Amino acid sequence: MIRKVAVFAFNGEEMCFIHSLMNALDMKEKGYDVKLVIEGSATRLVKEAENEKRPFTSLYEKAKDAGLIDCVCRACATKMESLESAKQQELPLCDEMFGHPSMARYMDDGYEIIVV
C-alpha cells in the first residue's frame, strides 16, 4: 500500500517553505503519494517564486513540474495578493471550507496531514 501524505505549507517564512518543498519532493522520490497544499502566509511565496533570484525558486519549480502542488488557498492568496500569480501559473485553487482547503477532505481520502 502506498503511503499518502498531504503537506500543508502554512508558514510564509522562506526556510519553512523550503523544507515543505524539499520534503514533498523527497517523499515523491521515495514513492509516496504526496500532495502539497499552499495555505496561509505561504501563499505569498507563490507570487515571489516568479523571481528567479529567490532561494526557493528552483525547488518550487521542481515541485510544480512534478505535479505536487495540489492546491493554493483562494482566500489566503487573495489576502496575500498572490491570487493572480496562482492563476497565471495555472495552479489549482481550493476554497471548499469557508474559502480555504479542507484538511478533512484529504483525511477522508486517506492522507496523513503534515503542517509546516
Image (cartoon, grey):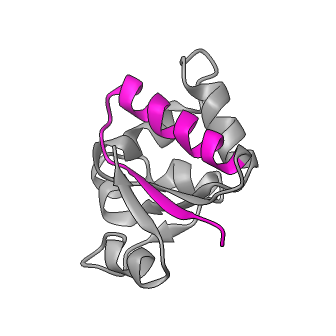
The residue nearer to you, when weighing 66 against 32, is 32
**Residue 23 at what x, y percent from top left?**
53, 39
- Asked if residue 7 lies in the magenta stretch, the reply is yes
| Left or right placement of residue 31 versus residue 51 in this view | right
| Left or right placement of residue 3 versus residue 18 in this view | right
User: Please, which residue is most extreme toward the bottom here?
Assistant: 108
User: Looking at the image, which residue is at 68% across and 37% down?
Assistant: 61
| Left or right placement of residue 48 versus residue 25 in this view | left
Q: Quadrant of residue 87?
A: bottom right
The residue nearer to you, when weighing 71 against 86, is 71
User: Looking at the image, which residue is at 59% across and 58% down?
Assistant: 34
User: Please, which residue is most extreme toward the front here?
Assistant: 1
**Residue 54 at what x, y percent from top left?**
54, 19
| Magenta-highlighted residues | 1-28
Asked if one can make out residue 71 in the rendered structure from this viewpoint, the answer is no
Q: Quadrant of residue 108?
A: bottom left
- Asked if residue 22 lies in the magenta stretch, the reply is yes
